[in-house]
Image (spheres, rainbow, N blue to C red):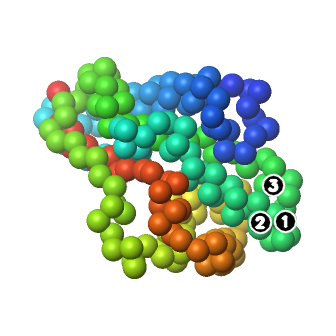
Amino acid sequence: MNQIPAYDMDEHARCERLPIVREAYAQQFRKDFMLFLELRAKELVPGGRMVVSLVGRPSNVKASKFFHLWETLVQILSVMALEGVIDKAKFDSFYVPVYGPSGEELREVIQDEGSFSIRDMRVYDATTDMDSMLFTPSSFVNHLRAIFEPIIVEHFGEVMDEFVRTAERRWSLEGSMQDERARNPRAMLVVSLAKA
């Protein structure tokens, strides 16, 4: 069971701007990732290697700003609930406990856990070098689909095609995908580890 404060259970995205909630998310991420490393270390021989890739945030981005991606998800699902595509009660109970660590946070957790040495670590924004013509409503919603489809399907059933249509319609009407990209700063954290 996670240790996210119970009073935050009735809010969508659960991580909005409250420092105590963000700190609880950071502590839960640390605890869970340390357990992940400990268990993987048991599976590897000394010197064995592992590559881990996860979504995080650039070091210069505050944790609170990282959650715009999850707000985007909730906004799309909210429209779907209003249109009757998904059940309102299911929408109200939807909970996505997410935390995007910075590269420094990830490095600290790995070093504190102690089972692995870091061979290489890269932090990059996959959209920075993307031509703005390629960053379209379709490409962004497919990015969201790749991240969230298992969670959404588990909770709401087979609604991903409608999720894609709703999101594409929203961004086609609202205009600039560059604004969306600016509101959703994130980074891919890729770390190559060797068992100590």
Mark 3 Cα shell of 10 Å, populated few (<14), some (14-19), many (≥20): few
- Residue 91 position within the rendered picture, expressed as x and y whole percent measured from the top left: 78, 55
- Decide which of 58, 7 is in the foreground and name it: 58
Under mark 3, the amino acid is: Lys
User: How far is mark 1 from mark 2, CA to CA?
Assistant: 5 Å
SS for dot 3: helix
185 lies above or below 37: below
Q: Which residue is located at x 37 percent, y 43 percent?
A: 58
Q: Which residue is located at x 31 percent, y 32 percent?
A: 104
SS for dot 2: helix
- Decide which of 46, 22 is in the foreground and name it: 22
- Residue 10 position within the rendered picture, expressed as x and y whole percent measured from the top left: 79, 38
Q: Which residue is mark 1?
A: 82
Residue 61 is at least partly visible in this image: yes
User: How far is mark 3 from mark 1, CA to CA?
Assistant: 12 Å
Q: Which residue is mark 2?
A: 79
